[in-house]
Structure formats: C-alpha cells, structure tokens
C-alpha cells in the first residue's frame, strides 16, 4: 500500500515538473532580453539561451570551486606527510647515532663458542 503511494507521488511530481517546464519553454521561446556583459555591449539574446548559459556557467564555477578546495586540501595533506616523514627520518638518525655511542656490554658473551647441546635437532 505505502509503496504504491510513494510511486504515485513520484509520478505526479514528475508530471507537474514536466508540465511546468513545457509551459516555461513555450512562454519564453520567443522572448528577447538585453544582456549586458561589458560597457557599450548589450546584445539582444533569447531568454532560454541566457538561462541555459547561466546554468552552465554556474555548474562550471561550482566544479572549479570544489576542485580548488580539494587541491588546497591535498597540498596541506602533502605538506603534513612530508613533515611527518622528515621527523621520522630525524628520529631514526638520532636513534642510530645513539646506538653507535652506547657501549656494548654483551660483546664478551658473544665471543664464546656455542656448545653442541645448544643445537636443536630438526628431525
């Protein structure tokens, strides 16, 4: 029952929008408008052409603005990654230098030969 109501509501709304667009097209088909874009330049253009071009310009501007924000975000992320990698390399270098400076107390124990009882049989 509710599925039928939902489907018919969508069909009715689509039909209303389609009828409105048809009426809009028929009423504005032959209308001319003066479009100013620069000093002493104002050509007569059809309303539908002006509306369509304005819509396309809005879509292109929205895409460009979104692309700009994504690029700024990617640049910030790239800088943060480079900074993190540089800090990790510096910490690794400091650890390597600290390891070279430490005295090895286990060096004499490593020089002792291993006994045969330390070996583990494989089979």
Image (cartoon, rainbow, N blue to C red):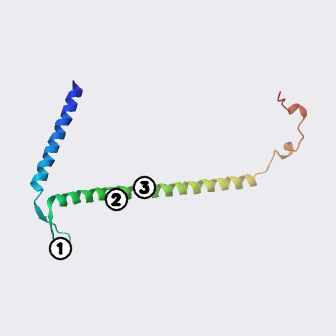
Q: Quadrant of the C terminus?
A: top right
Residue closest to the eye, 73 or 26: 26
Q: Quadrant of residue 116?
A: top right
Residue 41 point in image, percent of width and height: 17, 73
- Sequence-earlier tag: 3 or 2: 2
Q: Distance between the Cα atoms at labels 3 and 2?
A: 14 Å
Q: Quadrant of residue 54?
A: bottom left
Residue depth check, mark 3 versus mark 1: number of the one nearer the observer: 1
Q: Distance between the Cα atoms at labels 2 and 1?
A: 27 Å
The residue under the point 54% across, 57% down is: 82
Tag 2: Cα neighbours inside 10 Å, few (<14), some, or many (≥20)? few
Residue depth check, mark 2 versus mark 1: number of the one nearer the observer: 1
Q: How many marks are shown on the rendered structure?
A: 3
The residue under the point 15% across, 65% down is: 45
Residue 119 point in image, percent of width and height: 85, 32
Q: Is residue 85 left or right of residue 56?
A: right
The residue under the point 71% across, 56% down is: 97
Tag 1: Cα neighbours inside 10 Å, few (<14), some, or many (≥20)? few
Q: What numbered label is drawn on residue 73? A: 3
Residue closest to the eye, 98 or 46: 46
The residue under the point 63% across, 54% down is: 91
Secondary structure beneath label 1: loop
Q: Quadrant of residue 64?
A: bottom left
Secondary structure beneath label 3: helix
Q: Distance between the Cα atoms at labels 3 and 1?
A: 40 Å
- Sequence-earlier tag: 2 or 1: 1
Residue 8 point in image, percent of width and height: 19, 32
Q: Is residue 114 left or right of residue 49?
A: right
Q: What numbered label is drawn on residue 64? A: 2
Q: Which residue is mark 1?
A: 41
Residue closest to the eye, 35 or 97: 35
Residue depth check, mark 3 versus mark 2: number of the one nearer the observer: 2
């Amino acid at each position: 029952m509710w599925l039928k109501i939902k489907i018919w509501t969508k069909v009715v709304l689509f039909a209303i929008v389609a009828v409105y667009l048809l009426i809009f097209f028929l009423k504005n088909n032959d209308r001319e408008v003066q479009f100013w874009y620069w000093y002493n330049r104002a050509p007569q253009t059809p309303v539908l052409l002006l509306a369509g071009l304005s819509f396309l310009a809005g879509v292109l501007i929205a895409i460009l603005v979104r692309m700009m924000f994504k690029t700024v975000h990617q640049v910030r992320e790239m800088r943060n990654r480079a900074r993190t990698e540089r800090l990790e390399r510096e910490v690794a270098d400091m650890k390597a230098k600290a390891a070279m400076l430490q005295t090895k107390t286990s060096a004499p124990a490593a020089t002792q030969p291993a006994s045969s009882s330390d070996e583990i049989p494989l089979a």
